[in-house]
Image: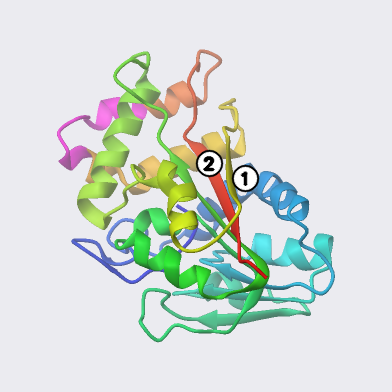
Amino acid sequence: MTGTAGGDTPGGGRYGEAVFPPGQAGEGERIDFGALAYDDLTMARLRALGAGPGWRCLDVGAGTGTVSRRLLDEAGVAGVLAVDRDVRFLAGRRVPGLDVLEADITAPGFAPGRFRLVHARFVLMHLPERDRLITALAGLVAPGGVLVLSDAVDLTSERAPGTPYTTVMKAMWQGLRDTIGTDVSQVPAYPHLLRGAGLVPVAAEIHVPPLTPGSPISRFWADTWERSRGAMLATGLVDDAAVDAAVHYLESDECAALSAGMLTAWGWKPE
């Protein structure tokens, strides 16, 4: 997906490089398609929570840095520390107020300081020990600050229509779980996990971008399927023809499916 701040994952190398190697041509563009689909929603939530002048922010799994830069440019925060395990997409896109740290957030010694806002999008879903990581991130929130977590929610189910999109999405989630450990099943529990980490009050919302021909989210999924094609084929749930049919379906006016949603949950550190 978009964040790359994790560590080793069973079967997938360090943060799933077996499927999404950062050095592969076009990977930065794939991440940016996801940003185009979700950044406006993310920024609206962060600004509604008060992100603004005087705030020092931590952007975990910053990817290409779109949220980090918009926090500075639009919200006017005092500074952003953008953290990623691989910072190649951040190195050439720095702006005043943006600091970049190459680090693994799963490491026991990860302690970059305290922040009024700690934000992680499409990161934790790829990592094990979700409870421990949420508690660790909550520990980086300054009193009176907020931890904001966004991850994907799978909206396919046994009752979902049997479209080419639904078939391939099910194979994608299974393939990513088998290869790089991606697991979105626990994402709806984030409000509960934030409360367990001592944050209060907590709340959450879900947004689902529309799947329309040529839209950023449609292009993101088509590119993601191509890069994870091998992992999907290995599940036995699809073949090459099914993946190709799903890509064509996304590009057609016949597409009538729900994209994966983005659940955003947040919790406040008591003063």
Residue under numbered circle 1: 38
Residue 232 horizontal side relative to residue 120, left or right:
left
x and y, in percent, of residue 244 in the image: 35, 29
Pointers 1 and 2 in contact (C-beta within 8 Å): yes
Q: Position of residue 248 (x, y in %)?
A: 44, 24
Question: From the image, which quarter does the C terminus lie in?
Answer: bottom right
- What is the quadrant of residue 51 in the picture? bottom right
Q: Is residue 157 above or below residue 214?
A: above
| Residue 179 % position (x, y) | 22, 53
Residue 26 in view, yes or no: no
Where on the picture, by quarter, is residue 147? bottom right
Question: Could you tell me which residue is drawn at 24 percent across and 44 percent down?
Answer: 175
Name the residue at 76% across, 50% down: 48
| Front disc: 1 or 2 | 2
Please name whichever residue, 268 or 154, is drawn nearer the observer in this view of the structure.
268
Q: Is residue 242 magenta?
A: yes
What amino acid type should be assigned to the residue bearing mark 1? Answer: Tyr
Mark carried by residue 262: 2
Q: Residue at x 56, y 27 (%)?
A: 211
Measuring from the top left, give residue 237's x and y in whole percent: 19, 30
The stretch in magenta equals 233-245
Asked if the stretch drawn in magenta spans residue 213, the answer is no
Q: Secondary structure at mark 1?
A: helix
Q: Residues within 10 Å of mark 1 (few under 14, many from 20)?
A: some
CA gap, disc 1 and disc 2: 8 Å
Prevailing SS of the magenta stretch: helix
Q: Amino acid at mark 2?
A: Met
Q: Residues within 10 Å of mark 2 (few under 14, many from 20)?
A: many
Local secondary structure at mark 2: strand
Q: In the image shown, does 267 or 35 lie closer to the viewer?
A: 267
